[in-house]
Image (cartoon, rainbow, N blue to C red):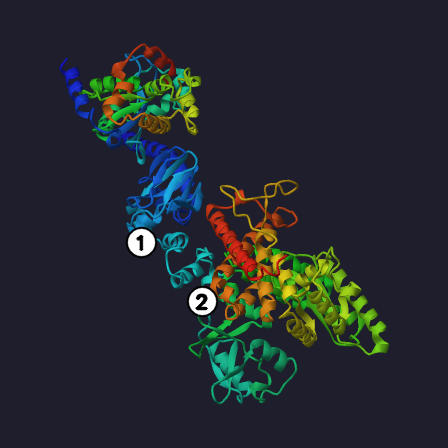
Amino acid sequence: MILKYSHINRVAYILHIFIYFVVKIIEDIMEFLKAVPPFEFLSDEVINSVTVKTSMEYYPKGTHILLQDGPPSEFLYVIKKGGVKVYRRVENEEIIIDYRSEGDSFGFVSLMSGDKSRANIVAIDDTICYLIPKETISTLINKYPEVRDFFLRSFMNIYLDKGYRDDQSKKAITYTVDKILFTTPVEEIATKNVVAVNETTSIRDAAKIMCENSISSLIVIDDQGIPLGIITDKDLRKKVVASARNVDEPVKNIMSYPIIKIDAKDFCFEAVVRMLKYNIHHLLVIKNGKINGIITNHDIMMLQGFSPITIVRDLEIHQTVEGLINASKQVNTIVGNLISQGAKASNITRIITEINDRIVRKIIQFAEREFGQPPVPYCWIALGSEGRKEQTFKTDQDNALIYADPPQEQQEAVQKYFIEFTNYVKENLLKCGFPPCPGDIMASNPKWCQPIRVWKKYFSQWIYMPKGENINLSNIFFDFRGIYGDLTLEENLRDYLLGIVKDQKVFLGYLANLAVRNKPPLGFFKTFVVEKSGEHKDKLNLKIKGIAPIIDIIRLFSLEKGVKETSTLERIEILKNKHTVIKDYADEIIYAFEFLTLLRIRHQYEQILQGKMPDNFIDPESLSNLEKKLLKDTFQLISKLQDILIERYKLMII
Amino acid sequence: MIRLFRKKIEKNAVSKQLIADTNFVVVDTELTGLNEFKDNIIAIGAIKMKGKTIKIGEVFYRTVSPTTKKFRKESIMIHEITPSELETCPKIGPILREFKDFSKDCIFVGHCVDIDLSFLKRETRNNLKDFFDPIGIDTLLIYKWLINKGILSQDFINKNSLEDIALSLGIEVRELHDALSDAFITAQIFQKLIIYLTELKIFTIGELINIGSIDNRTSQTIIKKEAYQF
């Protein structure tokens, strides 16, 4: 017995030692591969199975690893150390295609196609590569869609026709694994048990039907079966019981309407946005034009365990600024949740915008309560990133106020009212965590609190005399968006702007000049071009080098084509059909913009968690290899767009 | 005599073979000490190569229960394997048999490989009653030869330890002193040495044996004993 026991023990020990040591040597390689796309998508077990098939090669500087028109590659080469240059020789001229460095790979295309190599690969440094055999790669591609998508995107793009590419690239950036809110279609969690009643049904009967079916809502339809509204438990409580309404009245008298619909195929995230937007908790789910179910905020909270809707409800309830302060503090948590769920950047900024807009509106309502009804109609406008609905974390206040032209004799009194009014808003926004604009571009500044007549004068001056400060002001102000008040004032001003700006070639040339001013770093290899000195030494300014050029280019095209939208992504959608350049590059720009914004939000969120002030300086070394690669692609795209801009506006670029 | 003769035939047979087509097994053993008569193998680590390609997945590592009671303290310190740990390990017999299978038809490569081979030879004779005498190539000899040829810097002439040589060739040294990690480092050294030899138009096993074979042993033995990390 004892012998047997020790025997088992011994086997266990040997196994332990064996696994421990074998893994120890392979572990390093596994650790390395784990940080390299597409292997980063795979489980340890799978990576291990790849590693044991892998071999390791050393190429001294200057070695040609693959030759143009030479035999097809037998391996996928992953660079462990060093770097290579990919180039082609055409009629004795060397065309450099790319540089690849640690974590990048090469040899894929000829590996998969079995065609001769398309390019020369030469080690430009002493280089160590891991070689993964063709067979292993084929197996991965067949088994794991993530791996297939990665290779298709990163390598095949240049070789395949655009239609296919579009299809592939749409999936790419949302490198979410299974992020519930963004992957669950509404129909999956919607309540299918929907009962509809005719609008003439009595409240009493409707309540009875609800009880019998144990449901909390009923759809109200007309004679044609078209949904008109909805009645919920809340309606019965508030509009019937609490106000002692006669239960023989028809349900249409108490129903909530209009009823907001959502398609069964839409993702739950879209449902959240709609609920937020309309401040409702029920959406009618439509499938193939027919009622399919109802989705409630409760369904969504059940799905994810938290909800941005709660914060909005909080905001609605509070009647004091103190209440708002508490609610607004939750924004960071919500953004954190969205990030960890793998939300798209544009979805995160949409939520932030929705919440911030509500805070602003609420404070303006408090101001109206404080100072009494305004003497003339007005419209509060947001500028800059807030105007573009692209706010990330709490940024400076950038706002202004347009009011209707008052009669001559009231001018002073009206101005006085609005200055007090806007100062109140400014102070209270500050309390909610929005610091004042250092450049004093705020409605509380008399210069930016003006009747519409003056605004038109400002705009025309900036456009006709695009000099110095004027051009910068146009960039900030021309992204204006009405937040609260009489939105016809905003519309009026926008029509005016788009009317005069269209053919102002000189002005547009100035904008173009500004849009190409900041060149993205292209000449980097291994490292990005970063700040050379100062507080942000070795960091990359994501906003100046990447995000701003895209925003500027898209704004320019939008003004040129009379696009009313203010957000960059919405502008691109409209420009697709209006502008030849955008038509060709829309998807790539959207992709790049989403990616840059996401990097920025994630960076800022980390800073907030560390108790730092959010900024735009990222450390390129902190990026994964995939991110580095995408960033490189993104910068190449921006540079291409800038070149197109220079070409188009060359006569006007100074 | 017959055995030596057989080995000579073997060498002649492979001497025309190209380095690039040859299977190598890079080996490192951990020993209780350097006395060929008294000391024993504690662990065997090995990794295979084909030409200059390191086969990361083809590795061997086994720890052995020693028959000797005498355990040199220093070797314990170096390898961090304690006698009590080793007592639970299997006897050397089966491990040697397994290793023979693993290294079949391969040319042996190692840092001062003659020491590893002499221990493997004796253990095989004692435990398996079998004959074991493969061709061995010493990376240290090749390294010194390249220095004498002026290919590697004279500055390295006094470097003998595995770690120093690895560092002088720009190889990352992280997990020294377990047999498998050392074998892996030796493999990377061998990989680089082959590339230097290729530059000198040395392509065949015959030439490689002439430069790095333990049968061409000279006065190097003493240096080797110093350089060997047991």
Q: Nearer the viewer, mark 2 or mark 1?
A: 1
Residue B157 in which image quadrant: top left
> Residue at position x 57%, y 53% from top?
A546
Q: Position of residue A635 (x, y in %)?
A: 52, 52
Is B206 situated left or right of A206 in this image? left
Whether residue A134 can be seen here: yes
Number of labelled discs?
A: 2
Q: Who is closer to the viewer here, A459 or A145? A: A459
Q: Quadrant of the N terminus of chain B?
A: top left
- Circle nearer the N terminus (2, 1): 1
Q: Position of residue A199 (x, y in %)?
A: 53, 87
Residue position for label 1: A142
x then y, percent, for residue B126: 21, 17
Q: Are marks 2 and 1 on the same chain?
A: yes
Q: How far across and down, in percent of the image, does residue A448 sit?
A: 76, 65
Q: Nearer the viewer, residue A271 or A323?
A: A271
Quick check: B110 left or right of A488?
left
Q: Is residue A460 above or below residue A518?
A: below
Residue A254 is drawn in which quadrant? bottom right
Which residue type does callout 2 highlight?
A: Pro
Considering the image in quadrants, where does the C terminus of chain B appear? top left
Label 2 marks which chain's residue?
A
Dot 1: element: helix
Q: Looking at the image, which residue sits at the far left?
A: B2
Cα–Cα span, label 2 and label 1: 26 Å
Callout 1 amino acid: Asn
- Examine the rendered structure and indicate whether residue A539 appears above or below residue A446: above
What number is the disc on residue A185?
2
Q: Is residue B119 left or right of residue A611?
A: left
Mark 1: few, some, or many residues within 10 Å (few <14, many ≥20)? Answer: few
Above or below: residue A330 compared with residue B130: below
Assign a secondary structure to mark 2.
loop
